[in-house]
Image: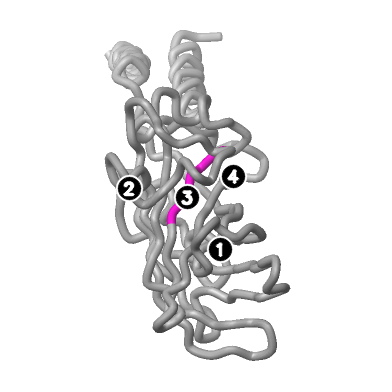
Amino acid sequence: MNMLKKVALAAALTVSTMTAALAAPINVGGVVWDPDYPIDFSSSSVQIQQIVNPNDGSLSGFGFVSTMNGYNQSQFCPGCELTFKFSGYTPTGTVGQVTSYVGGQVDIYVNFGPSTINPSDPLTMNAGNTGLGNLWLSLAGHELNGATLLGTINAISPPNLSGLGQLDVIGGIAAANFDTDQQVDGSDLSFSTSFTQPYPGDPNRVVGTGNFFGQSIATDIPEPGSLALMGLGLLGLAQVRRRKQK
C-alpha cells in the first residue's frame, strides 16, 4: 500500500471513529440519554398529578420524569431531577366517553441539588417543588383532527382516566434534539397518560402515570481532539499529494 492510500485510510478511520463517538449517549444540560436506544425516544413518568378546573374543565398539573431511553433517574439525570408542568388544555366537546381538548403547553425542567420529591409518594410532589431549575424542553399542543388531546373517562369512582395527545417543540435547551417532526401529523412528541387514584381531600385532582415517546437526534459538536486528528490526517494527505506533483 503506497503512502497516499495509507493517509487516506487513516483519515477515513478518523472520520469513522468520530462518527461512532457522536452516536454515544449525549448530555444536554446534565441530562444524559442514548439516541441509538432501539425504541428512541421513550420516557416514562411514574407520577403525574392532574387538576381539573371546576369552572371551565381545563386541565393543568405537574409530574416527575422517572426513566429515559432505558436509564433510570439516577442514570439519565445524575445529581439532578426532571420535572414538568402542563396547563392550558381546554375542552371543546364530548362524544360518548371521549372529550376533545385544544391548546396546552408542557414545560420540562432540569433542577440540580437535593430533591424533596419521593416518586413513590404522591403526597411529596406539588406545584411548588416541580418546574424548578432550567427550562430543558418546552412543548405546545399539536392539533390533529381538531384536538391536541383526547381524554377518555373509563370510570368515575374510583377514577379511571386516560389521555392521548401530541406535542410540538417550541423551546428549551434540548429543543434541537427533539424538533424532528417524526410523530403523527408531523408533531415532535406524543404522550399518553393514565389516572387511577384520587388525591386525598381534592375532588378535582387525580394521580397517575404517563409516557412521552418520539425520536431524538444527537446534535453534539465533535470534541476538539477528534477534529484535530482529522485535520492532521487531511494535512498529511495534502502533503503527500504535493510531493507526488513535484
The secondary element bearing badge 1 is classed as loop
Label 4 to label 3: alpha-carbon separation = 8 Å
Q: Nearer the viewer, mark 3 or mark 1?
A: 3
Vertical arrangement, residue 158 with respect to residue 218, above or below: below
Q: Which residue is label 3 attached to?
A: 63
Quick one: 205 or 35, which is closer to the camera? 205
Label 1 to label 2: alpha-carbon separation = 32 Å
Q: Earlier in the sequence, mark 3 or mark 1?
A: 3
Instruction: Point out which mark residue 128 bears.
Output: 2
Where in the figure is residue 88, as x and y percent of width and height? 37, 72
Quadrant where the C terminus sits is top left
Label 1 to label 4: alpha-carbon separation = 23 Å
Number of other residues with Cα within 10 Å of mark 4, as a class: few under 14, some 14 to 19, many 20 or more? some
Tags 3 and 2 in contact by the CB under 8 Å rule?
Answer: no
Q: Nearer the viewer, mark 3 or mark 2?
A: 2
The stretch of residues the image draws in magenta is 62-68
The secondary element bearing badge 3 is classed as strand
Quick one: 214 or 234, which is closer to the camera? 214
Q: Earlier in the sequence, mark 1 or mark 4?
A: 4
The secondary element bearing badge 4 is classed as strand
Q: Residue at x 50, y 47 (%)?
A: 216
Asked if the magenta segment contains residue 66, the reply would be yes
Where in the figure is residue 33, as x and y percent of width and height? 51, 34
Q: Which residue is label 1 attached to?
A: 183
Amino acid type, residue under disc 2 in the picture: Gly
Instruction: Point out which mark residue 46 bears.
Output: 4
Number of other residues with Cα within 10 Å of mark 1, as a class: few under 14, some 14 to 19, many 20 or more? some
Q: Is residue 9 visible?
A: yes
Label 2 to label 4: alpha-carbon separation = 18 Å
